[in-house]
Image (tube, rainbow, N blue to C red):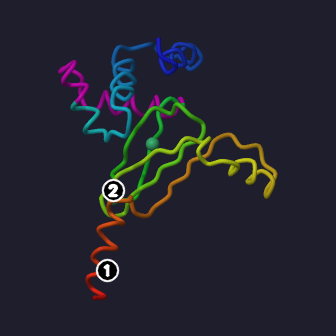
Amino acid sequence: MTEQAKKYETLLPHVGQRKTVQRQMLLQVLEEAEGHLTIEQLTERIQSISPPVSLSTIYRNVELLTDMGLLRSNHLPGEGNTYELADEKFHVHLVCQSCHSVTHLKMHQLGTLLTDLVEIAPFHIGSLALTVTGYCTSCWHHLSEKMSKREA
Ligand SMILES: [Zn+2]
Ligand SMILES: [Zn+2]
């Protein structure tokens, strides 16, 4: 059983929700996607496994799992609303303004950012979501090529 599934199993009795196949399916689909999915993409994938599940059922379950803290809802620049597994308390997105690719950074890749933060403003951090916008290396490469051509 995955970490998410385990968390799900332990959380459910507390919120008084019956375990449904649809919710397990949602978590499974998002886990396999290893990234962000829109509600349409989620629905498409779930319906390919189990056609009778309706969009409204999926929507309701997505909202419920988000409220339970098992899913994260993202509003990233240039991207519609997307969902992913909320498997870490700290989440960093690097969003390319040109091709809209999204890269995830692990918290340990940020070095001392978190401890520095607490030093600047004493606070008991529960979660952190960071969105960094800019250009991915290949878009930056194209852009700087264009710019240098213009200058020549
Ligand atoms: Zn993400
Ligand atoms: Zn890019």
Q: Nearer the viewer, residue 114 or 16?
A: 114
Disc 2 within 8 angstroms of ligand 2 (CB): yes
In the rendered image, the quadrant that contains the C terminus is bottom left
Task: Say if 66 sits above or below 133 in the image.
Answer: above
| Among numbered discs 2 and 1, the one appearing first in the sequence | 2
Q: Nearer the viewer, residue 151 or 37?
A: 151
Type of amino acid under label 1: Met
Q: Magenta-highlighted stretch: main secondary structure?
A: helix
Residue at 25%, 25% (x, y): give it. 46
Range shown magenta: 45-68
Residue 110 coordinates in the image, percent (x, y): 61, 48
Q: Which residue is mark 1?
A: 147
Residue 47 coordinates in the image, percent (x, y): 20, 25
Name the residue at the bottom extreme.
152
Q: Nearer the viewer, residue 16 or 110?
A: 110
Quick check: 112 left or right of 134? Answer: right
Task: Say if 37 sits above or below 96 in the image.
Answer: above
Disc 1 within 8 angstroms of ligand 2 (CB): no
As measured in the structure, the alpha-carbon distance from the residue carrying label 2 to the one carrying label 1 is 20 Å
Residue 53 coordinates in the image, percent (x, y): 24, 22
Residue 59 covered by magenta stretch: yes
Label 2 SS: loop
Q: Which residue is mark 2?
A: 100
Residue at 75%, 48% (x, y): give it. 115
